[in-house]
Image (tube, rainbow, N blue to C red):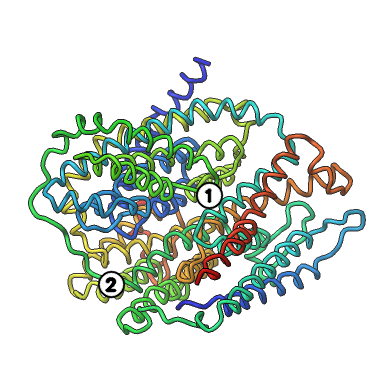
Amino acid sequence: MRLGDLPLGLLVLALGVAVWLGAQQFPTMAYFRYGPGFFPGLIGILLAACGLVLVLQGLVAGGRARWFEAAPWTRTPRHLVDLALVAGAVVAYALLADRLGFLPTAFLLLWILIGRLWGRPWAAAPIAALATLLVHQAFAELLLVPLPWGLLEPVSGSLSWR
Amino acid sequence: MSEVIAGALAILVAPQTLAAVLASGLFGLFVGAVPGLTATMATALLVPLTFYMEPVPAIAAMITASAMAIFAGDIPSALLRMPGTPASAAYTDALHRLTRAGRVELGLGICLFASAVGGLFGALVLTLAAPALAEFALGFSTFEYFWLACLGLSCAAFVAGPRPLKGAIALLLGLLFSTVGLDPVTGVTRFTFGHVDLVGGLGLVPVLIGMFALAEILRFAATAERLRLEGRGPIGNVFAGVLPLLWRQRLAVARGNLLGVGIGALPGAGADIAAWISFALARRRAARRPDADGEAGAIAGGSAANNASLAAAYVPATVFGIPGDSITAIVIGVLFMKGLTPGPAVFLHQPELVYAVFFSFFLANLLLIPLGLLAIRLARRLLALPREVLMPIILLFCIVGAFAMTNTMFSVWVMLVMGVLGWLMEENGIPVAPLVLGLVLGPMVQENFLTSMMKSDGSFLAFFERPLAGALGVLTIAVWLAPLGIALARRLRRPKPALEA
């Protein structure tokens, strides 16, 4: 997904204006001109300026610069599914881990991802299980990161060394 | 002085430090050798772990991992014609030609020893130059620091890619992200949209992991093709003939060292650019004076330059707290999290700490030879590991690493958003490194500006009143105006061919 200079510039311009407007809402200080809104306001103005230059460059380049150029991966369904799976795995983890627990969630996600990318779903299962256990050992047991237990809460005592 | 050095060595040889260095060295070799995983990614993935370490082992671990990864990037260049890290891209084709000619041992041997020599030279320059510069920097006030930070950020934006404008946009985005949360000067919350989790800011770690690790995994998912290994059979003795060849090409190696150090010390320009320039110059020289192993010399120069620049990037990082590349930006972020502010004061109050960090460069580059030999021996087995299996495991590592800093799912969301943003930015030719530099330096720019303004009663002119601040200010403004000047010069030159036609 590659945007031309014109749409990209418009996007940056809009962001800059929004940031500047947002910065105007911050309270001003009674005895000091440079309150909390000064810096974000400056960033907003500079962003808008960069966006404007990009828009102008896009206009000067004219017909040659297209609005939008599709990258190769947008034409191969395999890559699209892979991309959605990788991003979806993070979303799924954030939504499910507290309820299901780290061990089941991580295992399932790894199994699906490795199985799909590698194309060998059965060989992927033991690898996913081993990797999940190793990450759990390193972070939960060694570094004491409170990874969620979820469904396994009742038996967590027998699954932990501590 | 000798007490300081003894103290630094004592910190460095502590079992905890040595264990961290060894483990991170192996980790760095592995990450560097897998195409698509970069040295910056190795450093970013270490950040959640360094949270649980003392400052010196933490920094030493990151230094070792990045040095090893930069060398290990040469291994898939030789065997797959695919750079393991962007820093090897400059001489990948040349190195692969040596492999095709049946000289894979020679190629990898050159890279290994030139990398170690470059790294050691960089460490030497760092150890000698940084303390002297720090003494000079003790006289700096908030005015100078404001300009230095601006100068560093501007250079970063302008050298990051072919289009400075896009670098500037990335930089401004980073500065914008750094304002999210509680304003340290006035205590007002900014851009939190009523979200409690945002009051503390976005958090450096989830942003780093998202931008440097998740974005790479997304790119892999979008472009993955199966790799094919070049050649067969075990890799033989890499020592054979390497040292005499490097001696014949000592000038090329020395030029690589010097270029690497010079480019590395510049804010924003890192190992990749050092290797490109060094290799290109050596190639041109070799073309003028035909030489049987001129190309091997060019590879040695490039391989030395990227390792030398790695160490030199710590000169501005330790002296001024201004990162020279994205790896030192991460290291500075970690130092801030540990409550240490890099700058000349650290040289004064905790010299052992500074020297221990410097010495860990020597240690890392000496360790590079045995560990690098091991990596070369295992190279084929290492590269046979399917990336399709590694990437999901690294994804899990990213999720847990982002979560580990705050123990909230919010960090995982931040990492996801930043990963997708980082990937989209790179897709659209907007470099990611200036964003991270802006995020790390944003608070410094802002605090120094506001403190200076309070000192001067709100007069802008004060930024030019001190001689040093004035010089730095003029230099910064010159850097800002440089792209305009270049564009203008091009426009003035263009009409001529048009008239002829």
Q: Is residue B19 above or below residue B493?
A: above
Q: Position of residue A90 (x, y in %)?
A: 43, 71
Is A135 displayed left or right of B110 in the figure? right
Q: Please state the horizontal and vertical placement of residue B340, each as a whole percent of the image.
A: 60, 39
Query: B379 or B459: which is nearer to us?
Result: B459
Secondary structure type for disc 2? helix
Circle 1 — which element? loop
User: Which residue in the rendered view is the most extreme toward the top?
Assistant: B2
How many residues crowd mark 1 within 10 Å: few (<14), some (14–19), many (20+)?
Answer: many
The residue identified by callout 2 is A111
Q: What residue would you read off at disc 1?
A: B268
Q: Position of residue B233 (x, y in %)?
A: 7, 51
| Residue located at (36% from left, 35% from top) | B118
Q: Residue at x 73, y 56 (%)?
A: B183
Q: Is residue B413 visible in this depiction of the protein?
A: no
Q: Residue furthest right?
A: A31
Observer-nearest of A10 and A104: A10
Q: Chain of mark 2?
A: A
